[in-house]
Image: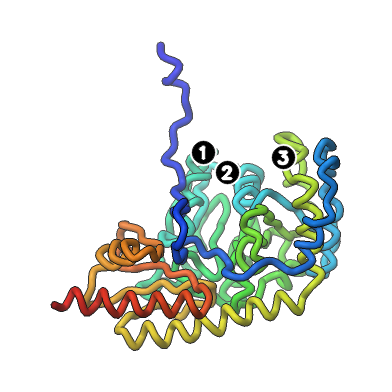
Amino acid sequence: MSWENFVRRVVPYTPGEQPKESGIIKLNTNENPYPPAPGVQKILDEFRISDMRLYPDPDAGILIQAIAETYQVKPEQVFVGVGSDDVISMAFLTFFNSAKPILFPDVTYSFYDVWADVYHIPYQRVRLTEDFRINPEDYKIPNGGIIFPNPNAPTGVLESLELIEEILKANPDSVVMIDEAYIDFGGISCLPLLEKYENLLVIQTYSKSRSMAGMRIGFAIGNQKLIKYLNDVKFSVNSYTMNRLTLLCGAEALKDPAYFENCTGKIIETREDTKKKLAELGFVFPDSKSNFIFASHPDYDAGMIFEKLKARKIFVRYWNKPRINQYLRITVGTPEEMKQLFTALQEILIEDES
């Protein structure tokens, strides 16, 4: 019998393309176009390379304390990991152990079904409405847990706190995870609901609004019992998940709220301007509250536009999947980058007409 008979086989997540060549306008992975808070550079400048020989703090104390103070919770309510992907993966492993299927939308972050397959978790994709919204009634069925992003990815649609609370009320025996990777671009966090629901886990990231995708910092906030269970699993797998430099930079990034608000504000302003210009070109899209827009043109094929943009060294994201194969996800870049995008789109639409 071959050793391959015992391999755990899954279809892996496919991340957005990371081009190696220069001169690319990269609007395909929802990265922040602006640098991290200036204090992060100060940490990098002052960090002693000799400290790299030492293990990091397994409790990630300096980072957890900073997050707790920023979000006004107890340190015992905070869990950190190597990006929100690591945090969500650990949460799947910890909380989704029922024989009942977990629930998440059919159009959503495409890592959810990958983790479910890796951990042998049964799951059910719940169909969004035709305008890509969640119907809370669909989540009032027996389940082994619930997860969805808010705002959703890749649609950018923001659901209300009332809808989230309705789902929480209907599922007291399931852990409900809200993935708030994009919440800082116009949404209201559901963190206040933690006071009422012990089964709620809120997950956020430094990768988008704090411009630190390259350092991989994610965190979850929940009640102390949930976080203890997460840490029990983490320390059973790998105690030293975050390096010393990342812990310092992550803590420092939270000390400059004015920079943070200015940075997210610029992206929101550019996003709203982008909506207007895309609409002028005939594109349609849900009302995004994230740092990207999920756009479709009724008269032009999305795959064609994707390829022609790529030929012009402008990268956006395209999935050839049911329901979304006529949509492009366009990250909001700088005003200069978006201007070049609009010029390219105008050229492409004119070319296709001729």
User: Residue 308: where, in percent of width, then height?
Assistant: 28, 65
Tell which circle, 2 or 1, labels the residue nearer the N-terminal end. Answer: 2
Say if residue 67 shows up in the picture: no
Q: Nearer the viewer, mark 3 or mark 2?
A: 3
Q: Amino acid at mark 1?
A: Val
Q: Residue 290: where, in percent of width, then height?
A: 54, 73
Disc number at residue 118?
1
Residue 34 horizontal side relative to residue 257, left or right:
left
User: Which residue does the numbered mark 2 point to in the structure image?
Assistant: 98
Total labels drawn: 3
**Rendered view: 216 above or below 33:** above
Relative to 338, 37 lies left or right? right
210 or 116, nearer to the observer: 210
Upstream in sequence: badge 3 or badge 2: 2
Do the numbered discs 2 and 1 sit on residues whose CB atoms are within 8 Å? Answer: no
- The residue carrying mark 3 is 233
Residue 293 appearing in the image: yes
Q: With 255 as the anchor, is 210 left or right in this view?
A: left
SS label for mark 2 = loop
Amino acid type of the residue that numbered disc 2 sits on in the rendered structure: Ser
Q: CA distance from mark 1 to mark 3?
A: 16 Å
Quadrant (top left, top right, bottom left, bottom right) of the N terminus: top left
Residue type at the position of mark 3 = Val
Relative horizontal placement of residue 116, taking residue 51 as reference (left or right): left
